[in-house]
Image (cartoon, rainbow, N blue to C red):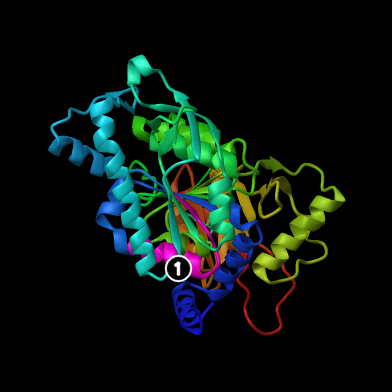
Amino acid sequence: MTTNVRTIVREVLGQLSSSKEARLYLRQFSSVDALNFAVVKVGGGIIENQLEELAASLAFLWHLGLFPIVLHGAGSQLDQALEDAGVATHKLDGLRVTDEATMAVVRPVIYRTNRKLVEALERHGVRAQGIQHGVFSCDYHDQQRYGLVGKINAVELESIRDTINAGVLPVVTCLGESSAGQVLNINADIAARELVWAIKPHKVLFITPTGGLLDGNGELISAISLCEDYQQLMQQDWVHSGMRLKLEQIQQILEPLPPSASVSITSVDNMARELFTHEGAGTLIRQGERIYHLEDLAEEQHRLLIELLETSFARKLRPDYFSTLKLKTILFASSGRAAAIITEGIGGVAYLDKFAVTPQARGEGLGATLWQRLQTEYPALYWRSRRANPVNNWYFQQAGFTAKNDTWVGFAYGMSSVVSAANCLEDAFSREDGWLPLNNSEGLAT
Ligand code: ARG
């Protein structure tokens, strides 16, 4: 890296929330083979409307020594060009029917879009290479029905591999060829899926204008764990058909990948933040992990649980903590990075004694997933948290009732009446501390 680039990189890293976090992700992304870091899918609209910003964010990655494999469509350019040429657009089953007249327009537009992105990257100091052919070997999908549309039968990685080995960023189009050399048009989502399956990258990035999936209130969904959230999500009536399809596609994409792989849907401007912070900026989708009931405190799990609690709260548990608990259950994530300890409260209501999630797991959405499980299993719950706990803002959103005293904030939801809520919160305030006393500074324990 030149000094100049290094300065820029340091400056950009400095803008991210904590450069320690950024370094952790940079290490993670660099630990896989250069070929396997990421496949980035960008639609034609982004190249049309945000070309410079897109080139700058990809340049940032390249300057860090990362080689995202860029795959792009040219949907909006094609629609326009076909209209200008007076060629009618037909779509069948989501595929663009491609007769010869259509192909005559499609090919040059895709080449031009590819060149545009490559040139923009070069302007940002990146060595980039357009790969327009030789990646997707195809058969005709159904020549009668769709014309010159390819069905991918093999993905040839040689040109992509050579490009990356030469330190050059590959920019791949969605064109394929038949064994006889006929150029065929491929749907960009299908091309992305096949490329991902062939590469098995650590990250899959979809760069979209909205920058993520939105929930029923139009708010960004930060993270989805397929194994815990998928079924429930698909039952929501606000999940419209477009999103349903997207989720199904993403589940398919992730299926043959190792559990460490993830998909991020983000925008051009949020790409670096999504990649290099725990919290991210977009929607992260992973296979996720199971949350289970820790029934007997078998030694290994118990040790993991104590470690999680003590590091999350930066305090030591009282040695008799577990033996004095009136334990109902412990919900524990299989990676050991999130836990909820639920005990008997008053009036038959459950009391949440401890809730801990590591910062990284929170970014993956594990905290939210665990909370959802908690809500499903305990329709009424109360808990307390020290007044300075930074998680309180979030707790306030989860609770229907809250109260404060000098030390604590008490929270409750699902209460049958204000009186029972008040009784519960009073009980929360009067509970003994599970932590060993701190000599000087105050901890943040619940
Ligand atoms: N930086 C991490 C990654 O890219 C975590 C991102 C978290 N993103 C989110 N939208 N919750 O893998």
Residue 112 rendering spot, x and y as whole percentages:
29, 49
Q: Work out whether residue 379 can be spotted.
A: no
The quadrant the C terminus occupies is bottom right
Residue 288 rendering spot, x and y as whole percentages:
60, 44
Question: Which quadrant holds residue 52?
Answer: bottom left
Q: Main secondary structure of the magenta part?
A: helix
Mark 1 — residue? 60
282 relative to 11, above or below: above
The quadrant the N terminus occupies is bottom right
In the image, the segment drawn in magenta is 53-70
Residue depicted at 33% across the width and 54% down the height: 115
Residue depicted at 53% across the width and 44% down the height: 372
Residue 69 rendering spot, x and y as whole percentages:
49, 52
Q: Is residue 12 magenta?
A: no
Q: Residue furthest right?
A: 299
Horizontally, residue 103 falls left or right of residue 280, namely left
Q: Work out whether residue 122 can be spotted.
A: yes
